[in-house]
Image: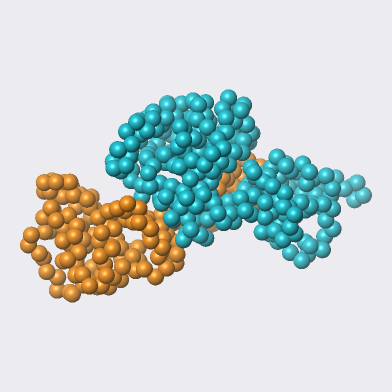
Chain colours: A cyan, B orange
Amino acid sequence: MDKLNRLGWAEGISFISYGVRIGIRASREGLVGTLNDRLPPGWKPHPGQIVDRLYSFVVGGDDPLRKRRLLYLLYGDGTRVARDRELEPVLDAFESDLRLSVAFAARQRVFVHAGVVGWRGKAIVIAGKTFTGKTTLAAELVKLGAEYYSDEYAVLDLSGRVRPFPRPLSIRDPATARTHYLSVEEFGGRAGVKPLSVGMVVDTRYREGARWHPMRVSPGAGAMVLLANTVSARHRPARNLPVIRKAVSSAIILRGVRGEAATVARDLLARMDQADAEPDRRALGTF
Amino acid sequence: MAKLQSKYDVRPIASTDGMIVEELDTELLIYDTARDKAHCLNPAAATVWKHCDGQKTVEELQALIAPEAGAADSRDMIVGCLRDFQRRHLVTGTTGWLDSERQVSRRELLKRVSVTAAVVVLVPLVTTIVAPTPAAAASCLAGGATCSIGSQCCSGNCSGFTCGPPLRPRGRSPRNS
């Protein structure tokens, strides 16, 4: 880190996101100003000099003096995060590392890897690993009128309610494995802003041709699904467990493989409506 | 109900050191901070674990779960349950005794109980997961995507700025791994 600190730094900013202070510095002017779109939702400038995580960009590109191309380098504190001939992959690595750092270090929030939408005042949380189809299902739900909260993290506050993390939806092109981003408005939907209690947790993954016959499982099984996708699961279990308990205590927990997202999305909303109409069943914990 | 007696005087004790316990209605969530594992005990297993106080004998614990099941079935249930607990470091004081007890698979037990019991019997069940590392609980890149370091790729392998297949130790064929 000392070696890094001795390099000349041309510019820098610091900001706060979900209570985590982040600093960014770059070896050449003009880069930091282009990063705004890559910062986590809801970030605010922070005047302090002490940060929880410091990113250092060593700007590469053509070196006309030595007639060679320098690599772009990115460090998170003292550890190298990315190294590439082009800037774009380094910025992608920065964005994903930054989101993960905020998710990991947030003191008042529990970040669960999940897609989230809101429906009639309750949240539907689609928890799961990458490539299980969370974004596709969240996008279908938004198309049907649900409010968009996140396609990456369910941000739980200490009372177990879900807060928005409204970054653009990341859609993967299966042919090129590249990701492109679409705002929720481009889907014809709208983003939710109010904190919501969890109405449903869905543990599913896409399998071509599969029929959607979910099994209703216990709140304990739902808690395990959320915990298995919690970023700080190992580091703050004493804080996470009560939050997750509160989140799932009155939720419907569904588990099963799914086929096409459109059919499943309609079914999920119908089940939410049914649970709304028959609150006794949920209160009794029938599953 | 006739009780089967053990030659051992076994009084299991629930391990609580380094365990974070959270009650969820009738279920129990337990996080083992030493091993970074989370356990979910269904209502029957939760009842047994909560009563493992070093005072109650196995016979007394047996009476707590499924009194509707036959003596042999409930004995197999409690043995299976305590074996699950021991394997997951959730109890102490059962070493030796469990080895001397008959081992019945859960499948066999479920089959038998469903045939013999007149009412629905909840068999004690423990579900366990290994708590994820931060990177394991985050999004990652697919094979063929541009990457800078291995941790960005789902495979953990970034070679030549592209996510490749998972790396395997030398000499092991994919079929054997």
Rendered image quadrant of residue B20: bottom left
Judging depth in this view, the residue of A263 and A88 nearest the camera is A263
Residue placed farthest to the left in the image?
B2
Placement of the N terminus of chain A among the 4 image quadrants: bottom right
* Residue B173 appears in view: no
Residue B116: x and y in percent read 11, 48
Residue A108: x and y in percent read 55, 54
- A211 left or right of B115 in image: right
Is residue A183 positioned above or below A225 on the image?
Answer: above
Rendered image quadrant of residue B105: bottom left
Q: Residue at x 29, y 53 (%)?
A: B26
Residue B39: x and y in percent read 37, 57
Q: Residue at x 42, y 68 (%)?
A: B18
Residue A89: x and y in percent read 70, 43
Is residue A61 positioned above or below B53 on the image?
Answer: above
* Residue B69 appears in view: yes
Residue placed farthest to the right in the image?
A65
Rendered image quadrant of residue B85: bottom left
